[in-house]
């Protein structure tokens, strides 16, 4: 017994459930795009926070007195000042070491502060020093990216971010 042609035509013309089938096929792609967009936006926002924090640390270091940072061409910045710069860079605060970092998982070991005492021009306010002006550099290296959906196993948990900023030390 073969089905009649009329029955076959009716089955092929039947469109009930077509929208559900299309949704079932497109839903995984739509979810992937949605969560991928969330993750991409979160990465850009986190990288921006990191860059802004490093710039703020460099600005703070640039406001230190030149004589506190350098003695001629020799770097003499005290360890306490370096700790302050690291704390400000990581947390945005100077007075409380218990503050949460701006980027979750960011520790002091990923913040690097250096001063090059012979890097800037020797004119203007630096003329009195008889040496070129110093430049403070603050860098964040290997800061782990706190993924929104890292627990799903879709994104690499080993992604790290870097940022670097420099500022002339002018002692304001």
Image (cartoon, rainbow, N blue to C red):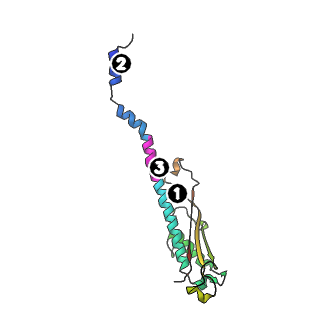
User: Which quadrant would the N terminus be assigned to in this image?
Assistant: top left
Whether residue 9 is situated above or below residue 54 in the rendered picture: above
Q: What stretch is highlighted in magenta?
A: 28-39
> Where's residue 44, x and y in %?
48, 58
Instruction: Please give the count of numbered marks on the rendered protein.
Output: 3
Secondary structure state at the residue bearing disc 3: helix
> Where's residue 109, x and y in %?
61, 66
Q: In this view, does 137 lie to the left or right of 33?
A: right
Whether residue 135 is situated above or below residue 18 in the rendered picture: below
The Cα atoms of the two marked residues, 1 and 3, are separated by 15 Å
Q: Which of 18 and 124 is in front in this view?
A: 124
The Cα atoms of the two marked residues, 2 and 3, are separated by 43 Å
According to the image, label 3 marks what residue? 36
SS majority, magenta: helix
According to the image, label 1 marks what residue? 146
Q: Which of marks 2 and 3 is nearer the N terminus?
A: 2
Count residues near mark 2 (Cα–Cα under 10 Å), then give few for <14, some for 14-19, many for 20+: few
Evaluate whether residue 130 shows in this view. yes
Q: Which of marks 1 and 3 is nearer the N terminus?
A: 3
> Where's residue 54, x and y in %?
54, 69
The image quadrant of residue 8 is top left
Residue at (58, 71) in percent of width and height: 138
Q: Mark 1, mark 3: which one is toward the viewer?
A: 3
According to the image, label 2 marks what residue? 8
Residue at (45, 52) in percent of width and height: 38
């Amino acid at each position: 017994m073969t089905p009649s042609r009329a029955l076959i035509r009716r089955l092929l013309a039947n469109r009930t459930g077509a929208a559900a089938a299309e949704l079932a096929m497109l839903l995984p792609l739509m979810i992937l795009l949605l969560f991928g967009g969330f993750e991409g936006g979160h990465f850009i926002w986190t990288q921006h926070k990191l860059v802004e924090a490093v710039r703020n640390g460099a600005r703070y270091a640039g406001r230190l007195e030149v004589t506190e940072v350098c003695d001629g061409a020799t770097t003499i910045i005290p360890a306490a000042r370096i700790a302050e710069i690291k704390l400000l860079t990581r947390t945005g605060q100077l007075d409380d070491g218990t503050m949460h970092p701006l980027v979750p998982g960011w520790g002091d070991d990923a913040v690097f502060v250096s001063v090059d005492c012979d890097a800037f021009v020797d004119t203007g306010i630096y003329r009195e020093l008889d040496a070129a002006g110093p430049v403070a550099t603050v860098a964040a290296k290997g800061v782990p990216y706190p993924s929104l959906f890292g627990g799903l196993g879709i994104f690499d948990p080993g992604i790290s971010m870097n940022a670097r900023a420099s500022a002339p030390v002018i002692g304001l």
